[in-house]
Amino acid sequence: MQRLERGFYDRDTRAVALDLLGKILVRRDGRRPRMGRIVETEAYLGVHDRACHSARGRTARTETMFGPPGRAYVYLVYGMHHCLNVVTEAEGRACAVLLRALEPLDGLDSRCDGPGRLCRALGVDRSFDGCDLVGGPLALMDDGFQLPAVDRRPRVGVDYAGAWARRRLRFLIRGHPCVSRP
């Protein structure tokens, strides 16, 4: 398996969201590595995207999104669930890809079908915000998996964003049993 390099993330967010499908997310913490295959993502396209956190401007919460690509943007939603995103595109663009679901592979004994469950299973919390995915304890790896058919759907839980909520920016492996919402 090969760790994804910085250039992978420094591209159009939609392309990164699609290309992350099938990649392996690895958490190393001194114990047995925890790994899962990414089966569902959502693209968030920066300050003009009404569903994107950066649409509300640069804040302490969103600072990581404005940084360089290849970093983890982790936030708490509803005061109880952490969500893991991958920062994409050039510094200052404030774009990211939400990792919505994993197929558990190694070291994961619980469901990862949903961003909160994914983070809980991996032990990812706000302390990982800003973590470098190219050289830190979280890594995205390519094992040469051949991606089968992909579906594009509207994003989940962003109805407040009007027309942006209906954009087909959610990507998932067609028919995969581990997606959060088939």
Image (cartoon, grey):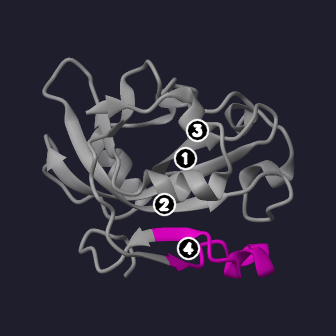
**Is 33 positioned to the left or the right of 13 in the image?**
left
Q: From mark 1 to mark 3, how far is it between C-alphas?
A: 23 Å
The numbered mark at residue 124 is none
Which x, y percent locates residue 28? 27, 25
Which residue was labeled with disc 1?
A: 76
Q: Which residue is mark 4?
A: 156
Query: Quadrant location of residue 44?
Result: bottom right
Q: Say what secondary structure mark 1 lies in.
A: strand
Q: Which residue is identified by label 3?
A: 9
Tag 1: Cα neighbours inside 10 Å, few (<14), some, or many (≥20)?
some
Q: Are circles 1 and 2 on residues that touch, CB within 8 Å? A: no
Above or below residue 28? Residue 82 is below
The magenta stretch is: 152-171
The stretch drawn in magenta includes residue 176: no
Inspect this view and state whether residue 136 appears: yes
Residue occupying the point 68% across, 32% down: 64
Question: Which one is in front in this view, the residue at disc 1 or the one at disc 2?
Answer: 2
Q: Which residue is mark 2?
A: 41
> Is tag 1's residue or tag 3's residue first in the polypeptide sequence?
3
Residue type at the position of mark 2 = Thr
Query: Mark 2 against mark 4, which lies toward the viewer?
Result: 2
Number of the front mark, 4 or 1: 4
